[in-house]
């Protein structure tokens, strides 16, 4: 089962109709606000390579760039495609691609970093957030400075029509002097910079621990950590090898849950009812719930341990309500429209609502609580006309209670 | 992109400097560093490029005296069952109010904080929302469940507390005794609602709001600043008059702050990032004196920025001790090293 996810062959197949906006028009992710979000959400819903999308999502958070600063949806989409292509390959190759990626060069000032006028922004983050971690004794402030010098040379041009373009490496802007990084002296360049980070003795432990954290909320034990590091280094920095080991680890199946990110929650609800992207409302709805794709809050990505508060819970309710919007039974049907079954029992109602969402696994205590509601919510003395209407309302309430239940926010 | 020098002062730098500062005592002012105007208590608070207001209410209810685990809201005596004790009138929780365990709330608009759904109505909706809350009270077998169920439970409480303020089509159910500025947008509306909520006795201890407009004035500063600051201040003045009319003024103080200062030398039509900033305390209980002194433009620091003459953390220490009667050291690292300016009337 795991290898089916981690070793997809060929191009992903997108099953189902192409994404559309409310007017039925194709999306324009490079130019229309929110279409970029919905374009990717569509891939999460339709791709037959879901783990590739999940890994792309992880890299978007790991190397978090926001279009707020990059200011070019096309550069963000190009970066997204790069993440997808390298999603399960070698972390060294991915890190090289990220370091020379135009969106990243804009976001962390790579193109502002020149010989004699070094900008250390990327140098610091490539060690602190991307490969080694802060406060582990992996690098010094001198290393940051020297690494900044090694990374010099990337340039781009700007025009009012084309924005940032012509990203290129200009050897004349590169600092050709000797730099000392991690105690090694040489005329290092950007590729050396990536290589030295990946070869650093504290990199494998950082990498496997951070990757583990996207799947499992508890720390790996010492033996697991050692084993994962061994897999990582002996496989030549293979992301796939580490992911396969994590996905087969007992902690992944038996350990505690994680709170589901808003976009994953959204994709899950759509998949559950077989709905495809037919509105771009998901962009603002997901934003309200705390996550708009291509707009992480800062370079360290989203705060995965803090998705839910009284505002974002309400936003998830709103989102779930949009999901059911085309398929809810109308309690007050017009003349000639079918009316809801006026004899449905509480047990039938709950079974029907669970079937609507594709039999999601609810905890027994939650299911009991919802069953209790189904049993007791109808007034004792309903008039003839209320028998059907109130049962339709009960069905709608059950669907919303299931979709917004705490159980559905964790996985 | 480009043209804006935000490019050389982006969020990554803010973030790392925020981290560098948060736990390491008295900071030195680095180039373009937003010190010391912000709260500085949380790395994320450095990421907001806006002005904010914090409204502190003392003695709003008779809740037990436990402390928030972190954040300025720690000042208030916290309760495990009162999410309104720390309230962000915003789309998400303000970093300064983020707590580890104690419940806090975020409400973007009190007048439409409801949970509507298609084909959903009484007499079923009431019991359904009861069940929604009960699903949040079923225990916490894991931290993820604790968060999901806790937030559901808090949401059900806030729904009930907000219900009296939610009118048809999001229209307010209350009338302010004083006029609020018509161009004050969401900010004025939220302050107006807050005064009504305080008057109704909701157990709010500390509320946070984001002021009008943005303040990263690299260009067009004279217009932007006077418009945004003008509307923000007019709204705060209306709020103060509202509190006075409702006789709540002795129980509330407003702290108005901006995250970071600007470079004294203009760049053409605006100013780039600088250092040192100001904060205002407003209220009938406030001493009304200036703390620190204007450093003047004659002597700037090595980056040609204003010299700060008083550490912002001293203000928070005083607020905690003098207003909330809470030991500052529980909230602010190295609190003992800061002065305690007198902020309140004797």
Image: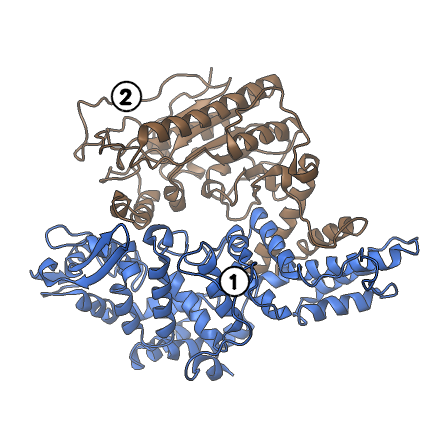
Chain colours: A blue, B brown
Q: Position of residue A263 (x, y in %)?
A: 51, 61
Q: Residue lying at the far top in this picture: please name it.
A: B346
**With respect to residue B65, does A26 lie above or below?**
below
Under circle 1, the secondary element is: loop
**With respect to residue B342, does A123 lie above or below?**
below
Q: Residue at x 35, y 38 (%)?
A: B334
Under circle 2, the secondary element is: loop
Image disc number at residue A25: 1
Q: CA distance from mark 1 to mark 2?
A: 58 Å
Quadrant in which the C terminus of chain A appears: bottom right
On screen, residue A64 versus residue B102, left or right, reads left
Q: Residue at x 48, y 23 (%)?
A: B234
The answer to which quarter of the image holds residue A220 is bottom left
- The foreground one among B32 and A306 is B32
- The foreground one among A280 and A198 is A280
Determine crowd level at label 2: few under 14, some 14-19, many 20+ residues with C-alpha closer than 10 A. Answer: few
Q: Which chain is disc 1 placed on? A: A
On screen, residue B336 versus residue A287, left or right, reads left
Residue A220 in sight from this viewpoint: no
- The foreground one among B274 and B281 is B274
Q: Residue at x 22, y 40 (%)?
A: B31
**With respect to residue B327, does B98 lie above or below?**
below
Image disc number at residue B294: 2
Q: Position of residue A300 (x, y in %)?
A: 37, 55
Q: Which chain is disc 2 placed on? A: B
Q: Position of residue A319 (x, y in %)?
A: 60, 56
Please report contact status of discs 1 and 2: CB closer than 8 Å, yes or no.
no
Q: Position of residue A101 (x, y in %)?
A: 28, 64
Foreground mark, 1 or 2, reads 1
Residue A165 in sight from this viewpoint: yes
Determine crowd level at label 1: few under 14, some 14-19, many 20+ residues with C-alpha closer than 10 A. Answer: few
Asked if badges 1 and 2 are on one and the same chain, I answer: no
């Amino acid at each position: 089962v795991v290898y089916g996810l981690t070793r997809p062959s060929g191009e992903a197949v997108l099953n189902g109709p192409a994404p559309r906006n409310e007017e039925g028009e194709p999306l324009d992710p490079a130019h229309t606000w929110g279409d970029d979000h919905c374009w990717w959400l569509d891939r999460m819903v339709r791709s037959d390579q879901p783990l590739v999308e999940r890994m792309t999502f992880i890299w978007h958070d790991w190397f978090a760039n926001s279009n707020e600063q990059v200011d070019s949806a096309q550069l963000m989409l190009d970066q997204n495609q790069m993440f997808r292509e390298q999603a399960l390959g070698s972390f060294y190759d991915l890190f090289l691609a990220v370091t020379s990626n135009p969106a990243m060069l804009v976001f962390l000032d790579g193109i502002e970093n020149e010989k004699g006028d070094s900008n250390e922004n990327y140098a610091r983050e490539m060690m602190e957030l991307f490969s080694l971690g802060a406060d582990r004794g992996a690098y010094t402030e001198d290393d940051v400075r020297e690494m900044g010098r090694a990374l010099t040379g990337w340039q781009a041009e700007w025009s009012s029509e084309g924005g940032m373009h012509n990203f290129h490496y200009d050897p004349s802007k590169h600092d050709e002097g000797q730099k000392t990084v991690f105690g090694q002296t040489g005329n290092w360049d950007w590729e050396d910079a990536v290589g030295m980070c990946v070869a650093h003795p504290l990199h494998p432990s950082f990498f496997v621990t951070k990757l583990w954290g996207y799947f499992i909320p508890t720390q790996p034990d010492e033996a697991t950590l050692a084993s994962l590091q061994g897999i990582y280094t002996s496989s030549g920095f293979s992301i796939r090898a580490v992911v396969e080991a994590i996905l087969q680890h007992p902690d992944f199946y038996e350990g505690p849950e994680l709170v589901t990110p808003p976009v994953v929650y959204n994709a899950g609800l759509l998949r559950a009812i077989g709905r495809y992207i037919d509105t771009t409302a998901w962009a603002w709805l997901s934003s309200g719930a705390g996550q708009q794709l291509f707009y992480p809050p800062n370079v360290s990505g989203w705060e995965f341990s803090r998705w839910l508060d009284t505002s974002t819970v309400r936003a998830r309710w709103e989102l779930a309500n949009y999901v059911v919007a085309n398929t809810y039974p109308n309690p007050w049907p017009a003349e000639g429209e079918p009316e809801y079954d006026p004899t449905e029992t509480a047990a039938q109602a709950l079974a029907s609502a669970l079937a609507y969402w594709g039999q999601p696994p609810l905890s027994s205590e939650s299911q009991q609580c919802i069953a209790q509601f189904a049993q007791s919510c109808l007034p004792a003395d309903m008039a003839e006309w209320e028998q059907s209407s109130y049962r339709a309302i009960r069905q709608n309430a059950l669907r919303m209670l299931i979709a917004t239940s705490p159980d559905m926010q964790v996985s | 992109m480009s043209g804006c020098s935000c490019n050389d002062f982006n969020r990554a730098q803010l973030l790392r400097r925020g981290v560098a500062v948060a736990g390491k005592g008295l900071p030195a002012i680095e180039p373009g560093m937003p010190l010391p105007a912000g709260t500085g208590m949380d790395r994320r608070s450095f990421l907001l490029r806006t002005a904010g207001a914090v409204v502190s209410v003392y003695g709003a209810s008779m809740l037990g005296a436990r402390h928030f685990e972190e954040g300025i809201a720690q000042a208030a005596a916290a309760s495990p069952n009162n999410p309104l004790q720390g309230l962000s009138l915003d789309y998400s929780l303000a970093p300064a109010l983020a707590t580890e365990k104690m419940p806090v709330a975020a409400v973007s608009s009190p007048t439409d904080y409801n949970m509507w759904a298609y084909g959903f109505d009484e007499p079923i909706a009431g019991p359904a929302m009861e069940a929604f809350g009960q699903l949040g009270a079923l225990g916490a077998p894991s931290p993820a469940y604790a968060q999901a169920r806790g937030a559901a439970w808090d949401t059900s409480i806030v729904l009930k507390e907000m219900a009296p303020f939610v009118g048809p089509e999001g229209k307010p159910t209350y009338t302010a005794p004083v006029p609020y500025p018509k161009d004050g947008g969401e900010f004025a509306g939220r302050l107006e609602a807050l005064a009504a909520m305080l008057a109704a006795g909701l157990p709010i201890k500390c509320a946070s709001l984001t002021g009008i407009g943005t303040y990263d004035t690299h260009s067009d500063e004279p217009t932007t600043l006077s418009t945004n600051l003008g509307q923000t201040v007019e709204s705060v003045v209306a709020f103060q008059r509202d509190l006075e009319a409702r006789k709540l003024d002795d129980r509330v103080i407003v702290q108005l702050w901006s995250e970071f200062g600007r470079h004294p030398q203009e760049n053409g039509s605006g100013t780039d990032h600088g250092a040192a900033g100001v904060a205002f305390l407003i209220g009938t209980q406030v001493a009304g004196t200036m703390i620190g002194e204007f450093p003047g433009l004659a002597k700037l620091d090595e980056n040609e920025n204003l010299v700060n003459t008083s550490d912002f953390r001293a203000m928070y220490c005083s607020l905690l001790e003098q207003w909330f009667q809470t030991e500052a050291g529980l909230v602010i690292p190295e609190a003992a090293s800061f002065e305690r300016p007198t902020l309140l009337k004797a």
